[in-house]
Image (cartoon, rainbow, N blue to C red):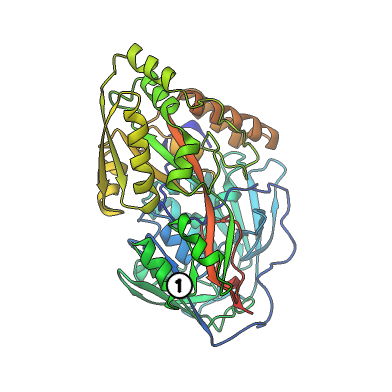
Amino acid sequence: MSTRHLRAAGAFFAAVALLTTACSAGSGTTGSSSSSGSGGQSGQSNDSVTIGLVAEPASLDFGTTDGAAIPQALLDNVYEGLVKLDQDGKVVPDLAKSWDISSDRKTYTFHLVDNAKFTDGHAFTATDAAYSINRVKKDWTISLKSAMDVVTAAEAVDPATLKVTLAHPSNDWLYRMTTRIGAMMTQSGVATIATKPVGTGPYVFQNWKRGDSITFQRNDSYWGTKPHFKTVTLKYFKDPTALNNALLTGTINVVGTVQAPESLKQFTSNDKYRVIEGTTNGEVVLSFNNSRKPLSDKRIRQAIRYAIDHKALLDTCWAGRGKLIGSMVPPTDPWYEDLTGMYPHDPAKAKSLLQAAGAEGATLRLRIPTLPYAVSCGTVVKSQLEQVGLKVTLDQLEFPAAWLTTVFTNADYDMSIVAHVEPRDIGAVFGNPKYYIRYDSKPVQEALAKADEGTEQDQVTEMKKAARIISEDAASDFLFLLPNLIVADKGITGLPKNAISESFDLSQLGRS
């Protein structure tokens, strides 16, 4: 996308929704000829399942409310897109059974499935698809909408054919259509979108008990393969001990986001449960406010990076589970480089930099959300920084409301700790000077723009360049990459090993 668009592109994250994508966009000229969602009713049951999660949505309208907890619940379950990601991170058909890309890479022609219906009864057509894309451009208010800026026109050629025209070639656009911005909606359903979403998916929204749970019922008129479970409940817990106890007592069947990795021993030693451990692209970031003193001084940011003993931190606050990466790029992205050696733990160098900057004894305010990993890691960061002579004031802000207002919106902080879980979010976080990190680098913005508009090899080369500049510039510190940790009753099947999309796809779950 253009530099102007990158400056507009911001992406927020629900800090513990470990279900996001970090794999190749698959920018071939034609999609697969058939959709994996089509078919019969195998595996149906009147059974129910309850999944324990954290970070409850603030609303069900992800067009006006930030937070990955909303698409975690709704995407691929209530809403579907033209395309989606498979378990290998490849873009595959969904409501579009195939697509063609013009030779200049600016026109996409989608051929839609012919039997999909919204849960309000009317058929899904190309008119609905065009409406959904145009609505993101016109009516969405969250910063993620900027991914649709490259679209100059979306129009129905006929009921089963959609044509989308881009302003310029974009390696990123089709990939973004697998996220919440690609959710297909009906014009008649948007009036109640925040409380009663209407989609074409395998589940129908039933009710939301705020502060407790969201319940879905199987869509027995679903156009594709019907899911196994008739009822699925997402139950939310703020306390990790309560979450684990709910599984032990049979209140829930799945811990969807393990929040206390040290507690896994009680499940691994019990043959009633199975533990799934994979990876995510959720980078736990020690965010710096680059726009105000003292962190507007690069030497102080560098000193902080040298002061952090990342291995000790990971061992202490997340039981050693996760991966050290040194940048804003997870290993599942094609442009990943291991940059952990760029700022090795070096307290002497940290002290020297602080002395050169005249910042010995400076006070920094670390304002973190009340989420288990942030609270646990915050105390370690505070201790390690104080060992090199900084003073750290640690504030815990209620999540999401207080943290969103204070840190994300008002940028009233020096440092924070939060997991950025949106797919391929390096451009959204570091390419937008207005984002809460307030980082403004023209070389980074230019590299990101070249990566999007160039060839696939250009994309890899320029994304590596951007990541390296960001890391060298110490725009933030990258503590570790969150693992995907799930614990479930032994008989539950279809759980993802890796968290590779924004959604928790309930339709794949079953019971053996």
Q: Is residue 230 left or right of residue 477?
A: right
Q: Which one is in front, 73 or 109?
A: 73
x then y, percent, for residue 382: 32, 36
Q: Which one is in front, 361 or 422?
A: 361
Instruction: Name which quarter of the figure residue 211 lies in.
Output: bottom left
Residue at image position (44%, 44%) is 316
x then y, percent, for residue 208: 35, 74
Q: Residue furthest top?
A: 356
Q: Is residue 437 visible?
A: no
Residue at image position (52%, 46%) is 152
Q: Is residue 365 left or right of residue 86?
A: left
Q: Which residue is mark 1?
A: 247
x then y, percent, for residue 256: 49, 64
Q: Is residue 93 visible?
A: yes
Residue at image position (59%, 50%) is 175
Q: Secondary structure at mark 1?
A: helix
x then y, percent, for residue 213: 37, 72
Residue at image position (51%, 76%) is 203
Q: Residue furthest front?
A: 269
Q: Is residue 267 left or right of residue 211?
A: right
